[in-house]
């Protein structure tokens, strides 16, 4: 048997650490007086350090066996520990650099928007998932995805492709949650992810070049499943439905400060071949527009796919293009301009319509705002009813329209006239009828 030992004080070529007195004062928050210097040198010497005085600086060589002493911060912390933390006064640290959200450069602005989006998603009740940037070709194929960015030397078959979408990883997370959950009840799944996906720009560059031929596209995605509420009596929980998921999406957009977002039925989608859209149930999915650009899709995982992967419960998924939605977010440091509440009260009118089921809420709302301007400021659907006496293939929709003028009180005749124009437009363009 052999043994290795080191003599106390042996340096074995340890590098010297230069420390100036001003640094000690800033880092520890104490005045570097001659008495304090003598105490510091004594402590370092007892730690088998070699200390040389070079005027304003101290040159310290740690012993070879103290591999943890490689920075001047390490030496300062050793001195503070030996003196006693209770003898070092508590002071507020001085910020010597500009905070990143206010730095103004493109990278800082982008990072600020990403953190704001993560915070908004967490505030809606979602938890962030952290998955690998790699996945398996077989798993992608099961979900209808194709990756154009293979890994040259993968760790395994499950890590042979760079992810073209965040959805496969979140679906895998849901399967793992179901598999590892004990009990007959279905677990609550509330997950999101915000990070890059990878796509080939063409021919892959040789390994000796910096350019790989792969570009990053940031995405934000979510996966929801289980009861509507996380607690309470089992009979009162209820399962998530499309309205719940749409509410989560709208809450995220609102909390992130997005404006100009529209949600339309997937039947009106511009790109029917999008792999995320094809993964969704055609009757329970939607397209999200950010301005005039397609931001993404969300909806219920297609029943055929759900059976194929042996999903234990309905799974709601969605994915949005980060660049499309981040353009509509307020920038870090941007000052919001608020308008005072109207001094005069608004007037509200409720309408009960009977329309074909394929008529979207967006068409009803946009029609009301179009026909009722300039007095109609807000329109919203607040109730939907299906069943007798509403005819088959029709649905009853309750709509509230809010009228006001900032400079004067409105007369009943004005809101009646605006309401008549709205009803006429609904009848003419949507084939709606007022429900008696």
Image (tube, rainbow, N blue to C red):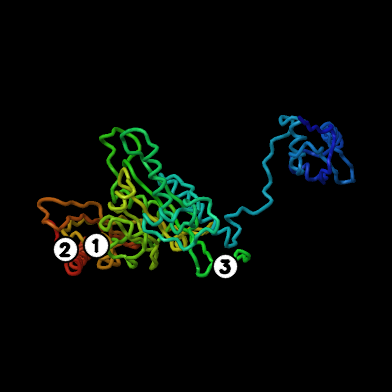
Query: Quick check: marks 1 and 2 in contact, CB under 8 Å?
Result: yes
Q: Is residue 140 in sight in this rendering?
A: yes
Measured Cα–Cα span from mark 3 to mark 1: 52 Å
Residue 364, numbered label: 1
The one of 357 and 343 positioned closer to us in this rendering? 357
Classify 10 Å Cα crowding around label 3: few (below 14), some (14-19), many (20 and above): few
User: Which image quadrant is residue 106 in?
Assistant: bottom right
What quarter of the picture does the C terminus occupy? bottom left
User: Which image quadrant is residue 381 in?
Assistant: bottom left
Say how many tags the image has. Answer: 3
- Horizontally, residue 71 falls left or right of residue 320, namely right
Q: What element carries label 3?
A: loop
Horizontal and vertical percent position of residue 175: 38, 44
The one of 183 and 429 positioned closer to us in this rendering? 183
Closer to the camera: disc 3 or disc 2? 3
Query: Quick check: marks 3 and 2 in contact, CB under 8 Å?
Result: no
Which residue does the numbered mark 3 point to in the structure image? 205
Q: Residue at x 16, y 63 (%)?
A: 432
Residue lying furthest front in this view?
1
Q: Which residue is drawn at 24% across and 62% down?
A: 364
- Horizontally, residue 97 falls left or right of residue 333, namely right
Residue 432, numbered label: 2
């Amino acid at each position: 048997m052999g043994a290795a030992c080191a003599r106390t004080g042996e340096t074995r070529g340890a590098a010297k650490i230069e420390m100036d007195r001003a640094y000690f004062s800033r880092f520890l928050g104490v005045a570097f007086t001659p008495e304090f210097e003598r105490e510091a040198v004594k402590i370092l010497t007892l730690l088998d350090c070699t200390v040389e005085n070079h005027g304003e600086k101290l040159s310290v060589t740690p012993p070879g066996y103290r591999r943890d002493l490689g920075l001047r911060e390490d030496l300062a912390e050793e001195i503070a520990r030996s003196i006693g933390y209770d003898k070092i006064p508590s002071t507020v640290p001085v910020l010597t650099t500009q905070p990143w959200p206010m730095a103004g450069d493109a990278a800082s602005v982008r990072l600020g928007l990403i953190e704001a989006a993560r915070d908004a998603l967490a505030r809606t009740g979602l938890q962030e998932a952290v998955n690998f940037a790699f996945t398996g070709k077989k798993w992608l194929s099961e979900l209808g995805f194709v990756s154009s960015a293979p890994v040259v030397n993968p760790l395994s078959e499950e890590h042979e492709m760079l992810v073209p979408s965040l959805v496969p990883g979140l679906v895998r997370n849901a399967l793992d949650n179901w598999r590892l959950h004990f009990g007959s009840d279905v677990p609550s799944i509330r997950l999101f992810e915000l990070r890059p996906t990878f796509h080939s720009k063409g021919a892959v560059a040789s390994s000796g070049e910096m350019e790989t031929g792969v570009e990053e596209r940031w995405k934000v995605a979510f996966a929801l499943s289980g009861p509507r509420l996380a607690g309470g009596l089992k009979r009162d929980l209820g399962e998530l439905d499309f309205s719940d998921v749409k509410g989560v999406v709208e809450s995220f957009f609102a909390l992130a400060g997005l404006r100009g977002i529209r949600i339309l039925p997937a039947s009106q989608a511009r790109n029917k071949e999008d792999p995320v859209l094809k993964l969704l149930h055609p009757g329970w999915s939607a397209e999200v527009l950010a301005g005039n650009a397609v931001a993404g899709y969300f909806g219920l995982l297609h029943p055929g796919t759900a059976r194929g992967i042996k999903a234990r419960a309905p799974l709601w998924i969605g994915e949005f293009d980060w660049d499309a939605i981040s353009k509509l977010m307020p920038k870090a440091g941007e000052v919001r301009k608020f308008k005072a509440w109207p001094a005069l009260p608004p007037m509200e009118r409720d309408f009960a319509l009977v329309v074909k089921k394929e008529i979207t809420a967006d068409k009803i709302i946009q029609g009301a705002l179009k026909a009722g301007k300039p007095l109609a400021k807000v329109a919203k659907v607040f109730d939907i009813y299906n069943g007798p006496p509403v005819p088959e293939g029709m649905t009853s929709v309750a709509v509230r329209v809010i009228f006001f003028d900032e400079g004067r009180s409105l007369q009943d005749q004005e809101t009646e006239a605006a309401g008549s124009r709205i009803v006429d437009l609904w009848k003419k363009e949507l084939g709606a009828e007022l429900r008696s």
